[in-house]
Amino acid sequence: MNIVHLITTIERGGAENQLLILCEEQLRIGNQVTVFYLKGKPVLEAAFTKMGVRSYKVAGNSLISQSFFFKRDLKMLKPDVVHAHLPRSELVATLSGTKIPLVVSRHNAEKFFNSAPRFISSFFARFSSKQSNAGIAISKSVRNFLIEANEIAKNKEFHVVTYGYNFTTENEEHVPSTHQTKHKLLAIGRLVPQKDYPTILRGLSMLASQEMDFEISVLGEGENRVELQKLSKELKLEKRVFWMGKVEDTKSFYKESDLFILASRYEGFGMVLVEAMDHSLPIVCASSPTAIEVLGENYPGLFEIGSPRDLAEKVSWALENSGILVRELDYRKRFFIASDMAQKVQEIYELIQVH
């Protein structure tokens, strides 16, 4: 099958990293795969090229011009299916007006256009889904949000296909640095309200007052950086919190840490959780619907959303009981196998080809 993916950027991000994995698996199945993107730096271009996937930037800057040029590109490639990821790409693919079967993937449990009024976001989201042949939500939580927010056209089904991952490590118990005096903690994610870093900082402040010796590396950039740095100083954590900015290769941080913390109030999926699983790194996580979907509703490292005290208690417990958490996480890996994810997507492609 000849597949064209369209995505807003090929910079590092959850949806972009997942597209890398999907393309690799689609090649293994025997498909021909091409990736188009709309803006930004071609950060992942080398990774796509290495696996044998060509990537191209769509010409133009406006929705209308990019739709025109994308339609021209499709005429040359003659794909069997177009798969669009993220809102702008959905609209460009939709407005291109071709008769090629179109699949759209929704990667976030938030409005189609987060900065627009709800009725405008809902209109464009429903318009895009109506023009598509099939929709994919990356988690049950995302699909539930789309339904509740009226962002799916009437009688249009969205299939749930969770992210997949090629796990690289053996299932072995994580060995925390208990022989050291300092616990190394890790948080990864954009510095935005959704990720709720204030809860992490306030929870860690409680642990500092209990004389726990720790440091935390925070990987990510965002609009809240200045106020978060100010808060860490107010909480007297400035010598314990290291703001690392945007990091391309996170592997060494996973390997060298004792515990991963995610405080997000909501997520589309939370790929960082699966990456932590891959490195046998214990996780303490806010109990959002998506986190429960990924980690399991009985996972003992869950804490109440927005509760610094509960976070502090779970961090303290997790550092003493890391083996219990890692065994739970090793079991959860079986639900996120990359080849299984790609096969489900392939079945959706074949289903719309038949119809």
Image: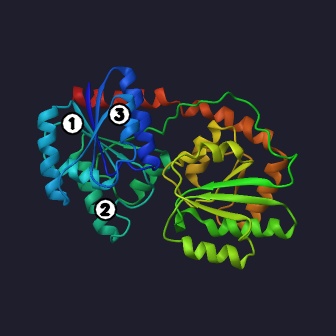
Q: Which residue is mark 1?
A: 101
The first of marks 2 and 1 along the sequence is 1
Q: For mark 1, give the secondary structure.
A: loop
**Viewer-closest of 297 and 57:** 57
Q: Residues within 10 Å of mark 3 (few under 14, many from 20)?
A: few
Q: CA distance from mark 1 to mark 3?
A: 25 Å
**Image coordinates for residue 71, horizontal then vertical, percent:** 13, 44
Name the image quarter holding the C terminus.
Answer: top left
Name the image quarter holding the N terminus.
Answer: top left
**Image coordinates for residue 319, horizontal then vertical, percent:** 81, 50
**Image coordinates for residue 200, horizontal then vertical, percent:** 68, 64
The first of marks 2 and 3 along the sequence is 3
Say if mark 1 contacts mark 3, CB within 8 Å.
no
Q: For mark 3, give the secondary structure.
A: helix
Side of 347 relative to 206 (left or right): left
Residue at position x 17%, y 46% in the image:
70
Find residue 49 and name its label. Answer: 3
Side of 38 relative to 287 (left or right): left
Q: Amino acid at mark 1?
A: Pro
Q: Residues within 10 Å of mark 1 (few under 14, many from 20)?
A: some
Residue at position x 27%, y 32% in the image:
3
Side of 108 relative to 180 (left or right): left
Is 51 placed above or below 254 here?
above
Label 2 or label 1, whichever lies nearer to me, is 1
Q: CA distance from mark 2 to mark 3?
A: 36 Å
**Viewer-closest of 121 and 198:** 198
Label 1 or label 3, whichever lies nearer to me, is 3
The mark total stands at 3
Find residue 122 and name its label. Answer: 2
**Viewer-closest of 118 and 105:** 105
Say if mark 2 contacts mark 3, CB within 8 Å.
no
